[in-house]
Image (cartoon, rainbow, N blue to C red):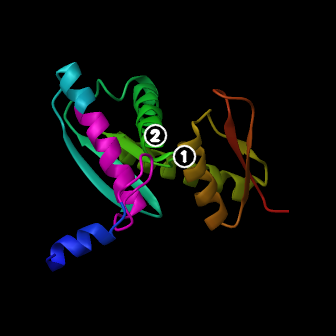
Amino acid sequence: MDTEQRVAEAEPEPVAGEEPTNVDPLDNEGDIAADYLEELLEIADLDGDIDIYTEADRAHVSIVTDSEVLVGRGGEVLDALQELARLAVMTETGRRSRLMLDVAGYREKRKVELQGLATEAIVEVQQTGEPVRLAPMNPFERKIVHDIAASAGLASESEGVEPNRRVVISKAE
C-alpha cells in the first residue's frame, strides 16, 4: 500500500450537510451561494461576473453587472435574492448563514448615501437636542445608521414594524 493510498484511507469521507475539515466555513458559504447564483443567472439569461470574499466574519458575494434588474426598486429583488442564497447555503450546510449579497454595487452606493443621511441627522440632534426619525429602512441599512450614531456618541433605536421600521437618533442618556 503506497503512502497516498494510506492517507486517503485515513481521511474520513465527508458526510452530507457537513463541510470538509480543511475548508473555511465562510469560503464554503461563498462558494455554495456563488454556484446557486451562477445557475440563476444562466436560467434568467443575465450577464454578470461573481466575486466572493470574506469580511467581518461574513461571506460576501457580489454580482458584477451593469444591469440593475436584480436590484429592483429600493433593493427589494436584491434582498429576496440574498435570502434565497442564504437558504441554498443552509440547505447545503445545515447552518444559518449571514451571507451578504451585492448586485451592481448597489449596497456600497447605498452605504455611502446612508452615511450622508446619518451624518446630517447627527448634526441636527447635536444642534437641537431633539431626536431625529429617519425614513424606513431594511435591517442592513439600519445597522449602518446605528453604527454611525454610536461612533458619534449618540443613542439610536429602531421603532415600528417591518417594512416601516426606522431608526431614531437621539442624545445619549
The CA span between labels 2 and 1 is 7 Å
Q: Which residues are magenta?
A: 13-38
Residue 117: x %, y % from top left: 54, 46
> Residue 19 occupies which quadrant of the picture?
bottom left
Q: In what quadrant of the picture does the N terminus appear?
A: bottom left
Q: What numbered label is drawn on residue 96? A: 1
Quarter holding the C terminus?
bottom right
Front-most of residues 82 and 20: 20
Q: Amino acid at mark 2?
A: Arg
Q: How many marks?
A: 2
Q: Are marks 2 and 1 in contact (CB under 8 Å)?
A: yes
Considering every residue shown, the one lying at the far front of the view is 1
The verdict on residue 84 being magenta is: no
Residue, disc 2: 86
Answer whether residue 17 is magenta in the image.
yes
Between 52 and 105, which is closer to the camera in this rendering? 52
